[in-house]
Image (tube, grey):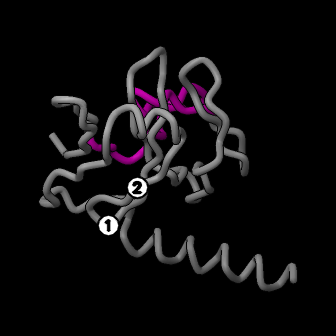
Amino acid sequence: RLWDEDEAMMQARENALSRRNRPDRSSGPLDLGDERAVRANLPMQFELGGMTYRLLAIEGSLVAHSTLCPHWFGPLDEAAEIAGAIRCPWHGYLFDVESGACRTHSALKLAEAPQILLTEGRVTAQFA
């Protein structure tokens, strides 16, 4: 079982390395749904531009972040949000969700996340 878990984790890391943590910005807007339904299901994950993001509410605002740590592509898809930041479970790097900046290592930054827009009660993700 441990071998299978390690193998799956390394395959996911290899896939991430091949994409180099850069989204395809040509992807059109993605409708995530009705705002009330979206907020009721937070945190939620979605894919856009070939990458996976997680949507959180930070002080009432909807914000998306990459689900991969830029260090060794550790998983951020279940990282707890604490005071607007998430911590990588592998090496402890702390990232500001809104800016993507690393609070513990200035050379690291999360991959660009799409903007989250609220229009007529609908939540949309799109690249600037």
Disc 1 secondary structure class: loop
* Picture layout, residue 96 above or below residue 25: above
Q: Quadrant of residue 2?
A: bottom right
* Picture layout, residue 60 above or below residue 112: above
**What residue is at 26 percent from the left and 62 percent from the top?**
49
Q: Residue 33 or 11: which is nearer the viewer?
A: 33
**What residue is at 82 percent from the left and 84 percent from the top?**
3
Disc 2 secondary structure class: strand
Measure the alpha-carbon separation of dots 1 and 2. 10 Å
* Picture layout, residue 101 above or below residue 112: above
How many marks are shown on the rendered structure?
2
Q: Position of residue 123 (x, y in %)?
A: 28, 38
**What residue is at 28 percent from the left and 35 percent from the top?**
116
**Looking at the image, is mark 1 or mark 2 nearer the viewer?**
2
- Is the magenta region chiefly helix, strand or loop? loop
Q: Residue 74 or 46: which is nearer the viewer?
A: 46
Residue highlighted by disc 1: 50
**What residue is at 44 percent from the left and 40 percent from the top?**
55
Q: Position of residue 81 (x, y in %)?
A: 62, 30
Residue 46 tag number:
2
Q: Position of residue 125 (x, y in %)?
A: 26, 44
Q: Amino acid at mark 2?
A: Phe
Q: Residue 28 or 10: which is nearer the viewer?
A: 28
Q: Position of residue 74 (x, y in %)?
A: 62, 56
Q: Which residues are magenta?
A: 94-114
